[in-house]
Amino acid sequence: MALGGNVSALARELGVHRNLLYYWRDHPRESPAAVGEWDPQGQQIRELEGRIAGLEGALGRKTLEADFFASALRRVGGRRRSSGSPGVPASTEKSGSGRKRRKAD
């Protein structure tokens, strides 16, 4: 067609209607990237890639939080040990003295 040949002969040779040749000429195929937008499988892949990126971001934030709290815990633990005081016991004598002990039935 571009060379100015017989369009009807070309259409017969290709086994298509000659109007289809004109349509193809006037409406060139879009780029593969643009075609992929209408591709359901390509759309699903893009959605899943987006979800993966979101999950990777969330995992990164959680890792930073865990590192921060681990570091803070190490610092607090180091301060407790360096103070020289034995610390406060978990329970005192007073907390247990006000209650009466009962035997199990």
Image (cartoon, helix red, strand yellow):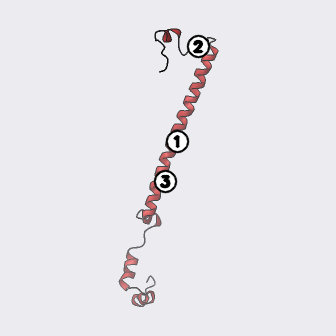
| Number of residues whose C-alpha sits closer than 10 Å to that of mark 2, classed few (under 14), some (14–19) or many (20 or more) | few
Tell me the element at label 3. Answer: helix
Q: Earlier in the sequence, mark 1 or mark 3?
A: 3
Q: Which residue is under mark 1? A: 59
* Mark 2 touches mark 3? (CB < 8 Å): no
Mark 3 sits on what residue? 49
Q: How far across and how far down the image is residue 47, in percent? A: 44, 55
Q: Which residue type carries mark 1?
A: Leu
Q: CA distance from mark 1 to mark 2?
A: 36 Å
Helix, strand or loop at label 2? It is loop
The image shows residue 29, relative to residue 54, as above or below, that is below
The Cα atoms of the two marked residues, 2 and 3, are separated by 51 Å
CB contact under 8 Å: marks 1 and 3: no
Q: Quadrant of residue 70?
A: top right
Q: Earlier in the sequence, mark 2 or mark 3?
A: 3
- Across and down, in percent, residue 13 comes to 45, 89
Q: Nearer the viewer, residue 86 or 63?
A: 86
Please name the amino acid that badge 2 sits on.
Gly
Position in image of residue 84 (x %, y %):
64, 11
**Around disc 1, counting alpha carbons within 10 Å, would you say few (fewer than 14), some (14 to 19), or many (20 or more)?**
few
Q: Earlier in the sequence, mark 1 or mark 2?
A: 1
- Front residue of 33/1: it is 33
Q: CA distance from mark 1 to mark 3?
A: 15 Å
Residue depicted at x 46% and y 56%: 46
Q: Foreground: 44 or 95?
A: 95
Q: Which residue is mark 2?
A: 87
Local secondary structure at mark 1: helix
How far across and how far down the image is residue 12, in percent?
Answer: 42, 90
